[in-house]
Image (tube, helix red, strand yellow):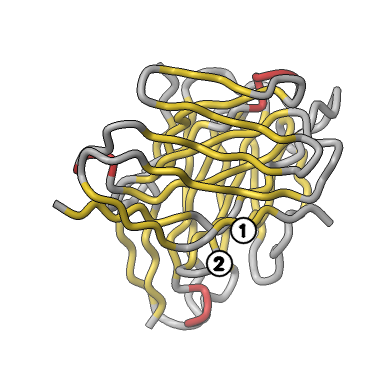
Amino acid sequence: GEDVEQSLFLSVREGDSSVINCTYTDSSSTYLYWYKQEPGAGLQLLTYIFSNMDMKQDQRLTVLLNKKDKHLSLRIADTQTGDSAIYFCAEGQNSGGGADGLTFGKGTHLIIQP
Amino acid sequence: DVKVTQSSRYLVKRTGEKVFLECVQDMDHENMFWYRQDPGLGLRLIYFSYDVKMKEKGDIPEGYSVSREKKERFSLILESASTNQTSMYLCASSLWASGTDNEQFFGPGTRLTVL
C-alpha cells in the first residue's frame, strides 16, 4: 500500500530556513500536498505541487519534488515563531472518480528556537 | 471560504456509550472524510463518503460506522465507545477526487475522551 514518511521533529532557530522532508512510495501519485496544523486546530492546506513539476515557490515557501527518488521537501525561509506547528505531507491521485482519501505522513513538529 | 464545522470541540463519554460526532460542510462538496489523529501515528482514515448514502471503509473502520443522509452532513458513530477510541477526530471534505479538487478542507477537530 501507499506509505508517506516524515521525520517527527525539526528544530530551527528563528530567522533560519526550515527544510521539512517527506518520502512516498506510490509512484502513481499525482498531487502532493503540505498541510499545517497549529496547536488545537485542524489542518490547513499550505501548498501543493503537481507530479509533473519539480519546484513551486509561494512567498516564503518553496516546494521541491524529486519524482525519481519520490522525495518531497518544504522549505520555509526566514522561519518565524508563528511557523511553529505540525507539518503533514500528503499524496493523492487523480483517480478520475470515487473519493480516495489522501495518504498522510505522521507529521513533522517544527520547533522554533529564539 | 469553505467551512467545515464539527459539532463539539471536546467530548467526554463513558465506556459502552453510543457516541455521535457530527460534521457539516457548506460548500456542496461531494466527498467527506473522517480521520483520527494520534501522537506518533499521524492521521488515519476511518471512513469516507463520495455521495449521499455512499460510504467506503478507510484504513481503520473497526468499531466505527458512518451515516451520510444529506450531502452536507457526515456523521461518525461509535456504537459502543471504548477507551482505545480516545483520540482527536478530524472531519474533512473535498470537491472531487480529480485534479486539485481533491484538496481536503478540515474541520477544527473533536477531542474525544472515553473513560
Viewer-closest of B11 and B109? B109
Task: Tell me where residue A22 appears, x and y as whole percent.
Answer: 60, 48
Same chain, marks 1 and 2? yes
Please, which chain is the residue tagged with disc 1 on? B
Please, which chain is the residue tagged with disc 2 on? B
Three-letter amino acid code of the residue under disc 1: Arg
Task: Tell me where residue B50 appears, x and y as whole percent.
Answer: 73, 33
In the picture of the structure, the residue carrying the numbered disc 2 is B41
Q: Are marks 1 and 2 in contact (CB under 8 Å)?
A: yes
Q: Is residue B65 above or below residue A14?
A: below
- Specify the farthest residue to the front: A16
Q: Is residue B73 above or below residue A57?
A: below
Name the quarter where the N terminus of chain A is drawn: bottom right
Label placed on residue A4: none
Viewer-closest of B48 and A42? A42
Front disc: 1 or 2? 2
Badge 2, how many Cα within 10 Å: few under 14, some, many 20+?
few
Query: Residue at horizontal 42%, vertical 27%?
Result: A61
Three-letter amino acid code of the residue under disc 2: Leu
Badge 1, how many Cα within 10 Å: few under 14, some, many 20+?
many
Q: Is residue B59 above or below residue B16?
A: above
Q: Give SS at disc 2.
A: loop
In the picture of the structure, the residue carrying the numbered disc 1 is B44
Task: Tell me where residue A62 appears, x and y as whole percent.
Answer: 48, 27
Q: Give SS at disc 1.
A: strand
Query: Residue at horizontal 82%, vertical 45%?
Result: A26
Viewer-closest of B42 and A96? B42
